[in-house]
Amino acid sequence: MKPLEAKLRKRRDKGHYWWELRSCAYYDAFEKPKILYPDITWRSSFSVDTETRIFNNTVYFLSTDTAWLIAVLNSPLMWSYCWRNAAHGKDEALRFFSDFVQHIPIAHGPGAG
């Protein structure tokens, strides 16, 4: 990339450094516990990440370390809800777009007010 440095420094869509595509407003969220889920899925595949992992656009995440939420999201009842309400893709795979997952109606869990 060094040969392209002069051109890359002139870009408007760069991040803090000339080699970055653009800065990310939520870099700090990658360092916190999170629930990961795939963009395209044929089954419930929610998992917990307690490490500082960064991933590409085929994985999304919820910033939370709420353990009971994993059980709810991976339950057969939740899969039934998602099957009826999520966008369906090729071969009937479900598309778990962030906007859909963030608005799944889930009651407050244990200890929540």
Image: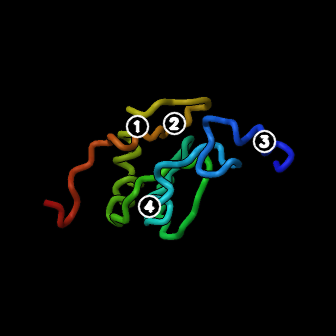
Of the residues shown, which amino acid type is indicated by label 2?
A: Arg
Separation of residues labelled 3 and 1 (CA atoms): 38 Å
Separation of residues labelled 3 and 2 (CA atoms): 40 Å
Query: Marks 2 and 4: CB-CB under 8 Å?
Result: no
Query: Marks 4 and 1: CB-CB under 8 Å?
Result: no
Q: Nearer the viewer, residue 83 or 36?
A: 36
Residue at horizontal 40 percent and vertical 37 percent from the top: 99
Q: Earlier in the sequence, mark 4 or mark 1?
A: 4
Label disc, if present, on residue 95 of the rendered structure: 2
Of marks 3 and 2, the one in the foreground: 3
Of the residues shown, which amino acid type is indicated by label 1?
A: Asp
Examine the rendering and report whether any part of residue 27 can be seen. Answer: yes
Crowd class of label 1 (few under 14; some 14 to 19; many from 20; radius 10 Å): few
Of the residues shown, which amino acid type is indicated by label 4?
A: Lys
Crowd class of label 2 (few under 14; some 14 to 19; many from 20; radius 10 Å): many
Separation of residues labelled 2 and 4 (CA atoms): 19 Å
Q: Nearer the viewer, residue 73 or 38?
A: 38
Residue at horizontal 47 percent and vertical 30 percent from the top: 87
Q: Earlier in the sequence, mark 2 or mark 4?
A: 4
Separation of residues labelled 3 and 4 (CA atoms): 38 Å
Considering only vertical position in the picture, is 77 above or below 113?
above
Considering only vertical position in the picture, is 75 above or below 66?
above
Q: Mark 3 highlights which residue? A: 6
Percent x, y for residue 27?
51, 56
Q: Mark 1 highlights which residue? A: 99
Of marks 3 and 4, the one in the foreground: 3
Q: Mark 4 highlights which residue? A: 34
Percent x, y for residue 28?
47, 60
